[in-house]
Image (cartoon, helix red, strand yellow):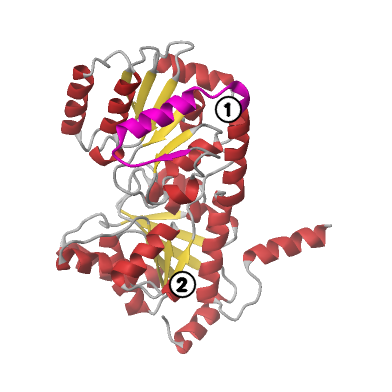
Amino acid sequence: MPSSTERRAFETEHAGRPPAVLQVAPALVTGGVERGTVEIAAALVKAGWRAIVASSGGPMVHEIERAGAEHVTLPLASKNPIVIYRNIARLARLIRDESIDLVHARSRAPAWSAYFAANRTGRPFVTTLHNIYGGRSAAKRLYNSVMMKGDRVIAISQFVADHAIATYGLDPARVTVIHRGVDLARFDPSAIHPSRLIALAKEWRLDDGAPVIMLPGRMSRWKGHFDLIEAVSVLNRRDLQVLFVGNDQQHPGFRKELEARIATLDLGGIVHMVGDARDMPAAFMLADVVVSASTEPEGFGRISVEAQAMGRPVIATDHGGSRETVVSGETGWLVPPSDPAALAAALTTALSLSPRDRVMLAARSRAAMVEKFDARQMADATLDLYTGLLFPDQAPSHRDLDNADVAAES
């Protein structure tokens, strides 16, 4: 953490200008790391701060810029030790040139560069643990350990925090659990115009009236696609439509294996791989049940939260962050991982809900997400953490200031 002299320098620099935060990520393609980066950049701009993101680029750069933040392209996705070393000087130069006050790293390779650049320039360093880091070898554990070096370490779930403390000896006093949030304005069933549903149903060639089981996520072995098709086979129903929503570009061989198993189980007319969905809120509305069947524990489980925000029945595997986002029997169901029979039983329960029960479950699910997983709460907590590092002696948080503004207006 910066010394008191460096802290006074920060406060002097801040006179007459907003504080500036640099977020460092490998790339801005798609996924939880990228979405969190965009959301915090937008929250910083909205709060009157300056937001800069450094990454190797990608399609989500336009979202950074649309939010009023700035993007700097650097080779931060590289795991080459030479490139990582050279990125230290690049980031240190950026920190000085742009008067950056705080550095926030979101992934391991760029975090090594960011850690040394922040130390070199005397800036506070924050990391976010987006998942657990096992590390069976000493070399892997060393590589992962940079994520524990933050002056403050954000964990996206209690599960992730507990693992970091137990596995890496991370000081609990430096860990803050800030659950990932969902954009409740975007993922709002009342905001979905029927035309969006019609267009997507036509694109995917869905049959009217056939129940839809949806598994969103990248086509990857650990996401549980095989378990779902085995569970659907157990159901022995021909009136279902199973949608795998997500791209297979990273694992084309896995798709071929999956297609072969689908053919063996005679599910070719039932299971459909539809690729990425440009309109996920509408996609969720087409589903009668949303499945998150990950065989390995997820750090948080964004899909389950977004689906519940849309009032969809959710079935998730009973480990990892899902235990913090799904209340089994109330807002969805938790089943043991890699257990197609248990998954089939939960699917039977979800698909047999009466219209009244579906409405009640939707209301409970939506209310739970609004209470606990609003993206604005995530942004508030993150900006409070930044403020505490930069201005530990300043009293109110930005949330207190918001409340004061409301009181003044009234």
Dividing the picture into quarters, in which one does residue 228 lie?
top left
Q: Which residue is mark 2?
A: 101
Residue 384 forms part of the magenta stretch: no
Q: Nearer the viewer, residue 163 or 309?
A: 163
Q: Which residue is mark 1?
A: 358
Q: Residue at x 54, y 59 (%)?
A: 44
Vertically, is 40 above or below 337?
A: below
Assign a secondary structure to mark 1. Answer: helix
Q: Nearer the viewer, residue 228 or 7?
A: 228
Tell me how far mark 1 sits from mark 2, CA to CA.
49 Å
Q: Is residue 177 left or right of residue 56?
A: right
Assign a secondary structure to mark 2. Answer: loop
**What segment is highlighted magenta in the picture?**
333-357
At label 1, which amino acid type do we have?
Arg
In percent of width and height, residue 173 lies at 45, 75
Residue 337 forms part of the magenta stretch: yes
Determine if residue 100 is in view: no
Determine if residue 15 is in view: yes
Judge the density around disc 1: few (<14), some (14-19), many (≥20) Cα neighbours within 10 Å.
Answer: some
Vertically, is 58 above or below 85?
A: above
Q: Is residue 252 left or right of residue 361?
A: left
Vertically, is 24 above or below 117?
A: above
Q: Residue at x 38, y 70 (%)?
A: 95
Q: Is residue 213 left or right of residue 218?
A: right
In percent of width and height, residue 57 lies at 32, 49
Judge the density around disc 2: few (<14), some (14-19), many (≥20) Cα neighbours within 10 Å.
Answer: many
Q: Is residue 284 left or right of residue 239?
A: right
Quadrant where the N terminus lies?
Answer: bottom left
Which dot, 1 or 2, sits closer to the camera?
A: 1
At label 2, which amino acid type do we have?
Asp
Quadrant where the C terminus lies?
Answer: bottom right
Q: Which of the marked residues, 1 or 2, is nearer the chain's N terminus?
A: 2
